[in-house]
Structures are given as structure tokens and as C-alpha cells.
């Protein structure tokens, strides 16, 4: 006789919501870290660290980013209060992006992270190769 695929224990009591004060902010912190730890956000913050830039200037400076991804990244950073968008009433309109005070506070950690990645890229590549060889990848 075969194994039935019908669920046998479908009436499970709902668990009460966790009210652990030590973990109350984990989701909020995770969403912030997802934004500031995103590779494109890191590049945008690095490029804006020396002053305001126009959209196309940022696009030229960040190798490999698409127009859509740059737009989404800038919107997310603006939404989180890390970047401001200023429109100048010229023809055609000029739009500048600049770090806010909050965004400027990220410059040092982002720079340190970027420098760490550059310094250790060869060691990480070697570790990945060893891992892949051991695991048939």
C-alpha cells in the first residue's frame, strides 16, 4: 500500500504571537540593512559622498547599473531619508541627487565596507573556488 498525500493533522492550534522585546525591532532593522547593504545603494552612497550628482552622471559612474535599477535605488534611498532629489526649473529640467545628513552618516561605514571588499576580493574568490570544488559546484 502506498503513502497517502492527504494531510493527516490539519487542525493545528494557532500559536500566539511572539512578544519578545529583545526581537521586536528585528524586522525594522532587517529592512534598513537590506536597503543600505544592497550593492547598488552602496555604490550610489559612495558616488554621492563628494557632492550632488545628476542621474546620468551617476549612471555613468556606476558600471553595470541599469536605468531602471538606478531609478529604483534612488527612490528607495529617498524614501528612507538618505538622499534628497532637487528639481531645478530649467529646460530640460535638471534633477540633482544628494546625500542628506542621515545619508552622510553612512559614508564612513560604506567606505570601510567597500575598502574591505576590495582588499579581500582575491581571498574570497579563492575560498569560493575551494568550496565549489569540495561541493561539486
Image (tube, grey):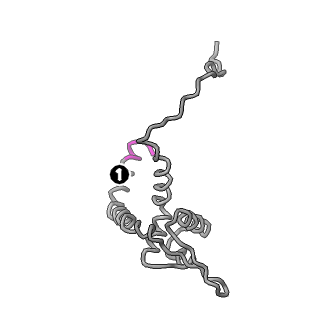
Single out the residue that lies furthest toward the top.
Answer: 1
The residue singled out by tag 1 in the image is 127
| Residue 133 part of the magenta-drawn span | yes
Q: Residue 62 at what x, y percent from top left?
A: 50, 72
Q: Is residue 21 above or below residue 81?
A: above
Q: Is residue 109 above or below residue 51?
A: above
Give the residue at x 38% y 65%: 114
Q: Residue 59 at what x, y percent from top left?
A: 55, 74
How crowded is the residue under tag 1: few (<14 C-alpha within 10 Å), some, or many (20+)?
few
Q: Residue 129 at what x, y percent from top left?
A: 38, 51
Report the number of numbered marks.
1
Give the residue at x 45% y 79%: 51
Single out the residue that lies furthest toward the bottom.
Answer: 91
Q: Is residue 86 above or below residue 78?
A: below
Give the residue at x 59% y 64%: 72
| Residue 33 part of the magenta-drawn span | no
Whether residue 79 sits left or right of residue 23 in the image: it is right
The local secondary structure at tag 1 comes to helix
Quarter-of-image position of residue 10: top right
Q: Which residues are magenta?
A: 131-137
Q: Is residue 59 above or below residue 118?
A: below
The quarter in which the N terminus is drawn is: top right
Quarter-of-image position of residue 124: bottom left
Whether residue 131 sits left or right of residue 40 in the image: it is left
Q: Nearer the viewer, residue 104 or 67?
A: 104
Whether residue 123 sits left or right of residue 44 in the image: it is left
Quarter-of-image position of residue 121: bottom left
Amino acid at each position: 500500500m502506498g503513502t497517502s498525500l492527504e494531510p493527516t493533522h490539519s487542525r493545528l492550534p494557532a500559536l500566539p504571537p511572539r512578544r519578545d522585546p529583545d526581537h521586536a525591532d528585528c524586522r525594522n532593522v532587517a529592512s534598513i540593512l537590506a536597503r543600505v547593504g544592497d550593492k547598488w545603494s552602496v555604490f550610489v552612497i559612495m558616488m554621492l559622498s563628494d557632492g550632488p550628482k545628476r542621474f546620468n552622471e551617476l549612471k555613468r559612474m556606476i558600471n553595470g547599473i541599469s536605468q531602471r535599477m538606478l531609478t529604483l535605488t534612488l527612490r528607495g534611498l529617498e524614501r528612507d531619508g538618505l538622499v534628497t532629489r532637487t528639481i531645478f526649473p530649467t529646460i530640460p529640467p535638471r534633477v540633482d541627487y544628494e546625500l542628506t545628513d542621515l545619508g552622510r552618516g553612512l559614508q564612513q561605514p560604506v567606505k570601510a565596507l567597500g575598502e574591505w571588499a576590495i582588499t579581500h576580493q582575491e581571498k574570497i574568490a579563492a575560498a569560493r573556488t575551494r568550496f565549489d570544488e569540495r561541493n561539486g559546484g
